Image (tube, helix red, strand yellow):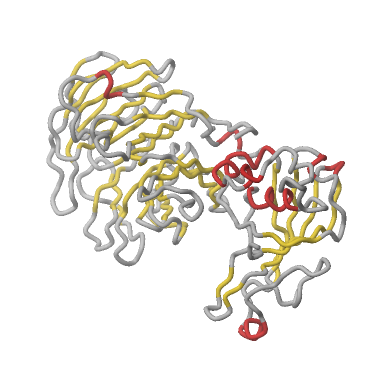
Amino acid sequence: MSTDMYGVRVLKVDPDRLRVRIQVLVVYYDTGSRTHIPLPGEEPGVFLHFLWESAAGYLSNDDERKGPLGRVLSTDDILNYEWVDTNARRFISEVRRTETFNDPPTEEQWEELHDFYYERGGAWQDEGLLIQSEYEIRVTDRKWLEHLSQGQAWGSAAFPLNGDSWTAEDAPHIPDLAQPAVSLRPFETTTGSVKYDCVERMEFSDDGKYLAVCSDQGRVWVYDTADWSETVHTHAGDWIVPLMMWVPGEHVLVVKSYSIGDEPEEEAQWAYDVDQGTAVEVPFQRGHLRSGDGAYRISPNNAGEGGFDLHGEQRAPYRQLSHAGGWDPIQCHAFSGNSSRLFLGAQENLYVVDPAKGEVVDKVMDASERLFELASNPDGSYLAIGSFSRKLSYLEFGENRPHELCIWRMADKRIILGHQFRSFIDELAWSPNDGRWLAVALEPMSDGQFHCGKTEIAVFRMGPGESH
């Protein structure tokens, strides 16, 4: 018999309104180390499992659940955690935690708690001590609730997953990660050796008309976002870790070498006018990244924190940022499309900067086990972040450690949408003007394909469907 993780009780059920209120109690503890399985958040996967388990009579002769969900979801379905992550929203449209008790337990409560609790006659020993919460759940069909009754209780061996928890209000502003609208394979049209080559940079033009892509070996592609046709395919020359940016307000692309903070940038660059289809001369474009309006640029600093200073067009910084107060090197960065926010991602921590003040105005500590890439939507209300997978504890990857794409809602710093890739995320770009497109550069992990010109660019449009 599996060890129960939670106790579940129905407090109120209203099938006509598609709503049920439940109580969830933590019934598994390690009192020696003072640790416990956490209460579920607001993602629907674990609650789908709860409802699936809740059928009266428990199991049929062929070891399948008798309840309404048991007739449409097999044991194999509900134990396929990747499937549940993706499909739980087909059954549960919203979860909201309303009240929490005994979290964390006091030292006196820990002294009284046991490691395991089991349901006996619809109750649990020491219920007043147990960590517990109440949740309001909204389902997609009344039949998922018709078998429930007030006071019904059961033990559950389910555990929290990392599925989606976006709401109808979020939907127009976040990408549909179920399937790319377009898949681009830039290296398929190139010639010569592509060994050791991969996508290094991606940037939308300020008006969103073009998506530019630069490889580690200086290859450049430009796609017209109206039909995703390849408009430019050329070579920018040999640059040490190439950086790429658009000239503000123009369809002129610049490629140059990555600079460090010890010395001024070497004023050498390659510039290309996409509309004219020719190389051109333009003023040197400073910095590693610029804001959408061109008012702010960032360059590595020597402040001892591994961060960046803010610049205008001048060489010297006019805002020296102190993002951490200590050594916390920045791994990825992005301006919001409207230039109101600068996001700095360290290995684990996320910093939000007001570039007008040059100050950190918000932060998320321990945002991820590792942050690799990030992109912001136009107003900075949502972030796309490529990070280590949150699902390693329940998905089988063997020795591989692929990346997950997560969408953060910055109003409450929650991950509301995620997609598990079987690849690395090398670059992200979110169209800055209308936020219509999110481009993701995916690098294969397998031997013989990694950094060998096999990168695919998946382009997602906004507005996930309910089936995602």
Residue furthest front as drawn: 61
The image quadrant where one finds the C terminus is top right
Q: Position of residue 400 (x, y in %)?
A: 36, 47
Q: How many marks?
A: 0
User: Residue 406 placed where, x, y %?
Assistant: 48, 45
Q: Residue at x 71, y 53 (%)?
A: 50
Name the residue at 60% across, 48% down. 79
Q: Residue at x 28, y 21 (%)?
A: 188
Residue 399, x across and y down, in percent:
35, 50
Q: Is residue 214 above or below residue 385?
A: above
Q: Establish if 407 lies above or below 249.
A: below
Q: Which of the image's four quarters has the N terminus?
A: bottom right
Q: Residue furthest top?
A: 276
Residue at (14, 35) in percent of width and height? 239
Residue 306 lies in what quarter of the image? bottom left
393 and 94: which is toward the camera: 393
- Please state if 139 lies on the left or on the right of 396 as rendered: right
Q: Is residue 144 above or below residue 271?
A: below
Q: Nearer the viewer, residue 460 or 14?
A: 14
